[in-house]
Image: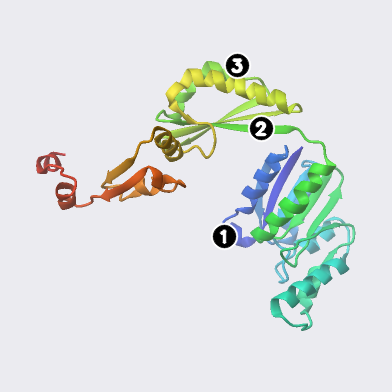
Amino acid sequence: MKATIVTIGDEILIGQILDTNSQYIARAFDRIGIDVHEMMSISDNRQHILETFSRLQDHSDFVLITGGLGPTKDDITKKTLADYFDDVLVSDPNVLSHVEQLFRNFTGTDKPLLQTNIDQALVPSKSIVLHNQYGTAPGIWMQKGKTVFISMPGVPYEMKGLIDEVIIPKISNDYQRPFIIHKTIMTYGVGESLLADKIADWEDHLPDFIKLAYLPAPGRVRLRLSARGSDKKELEQALADHIEKLTQILGRIITGFDEGETIEAVLGRQLTQRGLTLSTAESCTGGKIAQVITSIPGSSQYFKGSVVSYSKEVKMGTLGVSKDTITQH
C-alpha cells in the first residue's frame, strides 16, 4: 500500500515554518507497513489543490492532507475537498458541541460563538468525521475510487493526536498490511565509499525483501536494513543472520545496532561496565565534547569534568602544556 503526504500552506512554501508534520506522518505509516512514496507542499490555492487531488487519485491508497482547516478565510481545504467530491458542507452536531465545550473551558463563560467558530463544525456530508479532541477542526475521511483522502489540521499537536489516536488505529483495524522491520547498524571512522567497497559482496547476497540504505554523516555512516514481508518471524531471523555476517566483516567499525546507539551512548555504557571514569581537556571545541558526553542520562557516574582551555595561559597554567609545544604546534 502506498501513501502520499500533502501539506497545504503558503507559510511552508516561503520557508516561514518547517514542515515537521510530514516527517511525523511518514514515521507513523512506516510502522504499520505502508510506504510513503511521495511528499509535497502546495499553496493555499483552490485550483492547485484540486489538480493535486486529481493527480493522486487512484495512484495512492492514502492521501494524507494537513493544513487549511482553520477558521480564517485562507483556510480553504475543507471547501475544496467538498468540491472535489461534488459534495456540500453540513454542520456536524457532535463537532459543534465539542467546539462549544472547548470555548466554555477556555473562556469560563457561555458567551455565544463567533460565526467563524460555528463554521468549524461544517464537514462534507459524505465524509467520516474524525474526532479532534485537541482542537476545533475535525479530521475528515473520504474515499473516491481506491484512494482514501484524510484531511487533518496543520497544528502539529492536533495532527499528532489524530494520527496516533484515530487514523493509525482505524487503518490498522480495517486494512491488511505487510510487516516492515528496520535495523540500523552504526559504523564509525570509515567513509561511505570505503565502507561500500568492504561490504559489496555481502550486499550483493541480500535477498530481494531486504533493502540496504547508506546514511552518511561526518565521521560515521548508518547502515539501515529494511525487511518487508508477511511473516514477521521470518523477517527477524533473516535480518539477524545477515547482520551477524556483516558484524564478522566489519568488526570494530560497528559501534551499535540502533538509532540511539551514538558514540557517546556506547562510550558511556562501556565506561560504566568497566568501572572507569573520564574527563576532558578541550580547546577549539569550546566544551562541545563535554556537552555531548553529558547529554547521556547517568553520565555523572563516569564523567568527572572538563577544562575548556581556550587561551594559551590556561593551557600552560592549568593543563601544564609546555610553551614550546604551543609555539611549535
Mark closer to the chain start, 2 or 1 = 1
217 in relation to 298, above or below = above
The label on residue 17 is 1
Mark closer to the chain start, 2 or 3 = 2
Q: Residue at x 69, y 60 (%)?
A: 158
User: CA–CA distance between discs 1 and 3?
Assistant: 43 Å
The quarter of the image holding the N terminus is: top right
Q: Residue at x 72, y 28 (%)?
A: 232
Of residue 170 and residue 202, the one placed in the foreground of this image is: 170
Q: Quick check: 115 left or right of 43? A: right
For disc 3, the marked residue is 205
Q: Residue at x 82, y 54 (%)?
A: 141
Q: Quick check: 110 left or right of 203? A: right
Which picture quadrant has residue 159? bottom right
The quarter of the image holding the C terminus is: top left
For disc 2, the marked residue is 181
User: CA–CA distance between discs 2 and 3?
Assistant: 19 Å
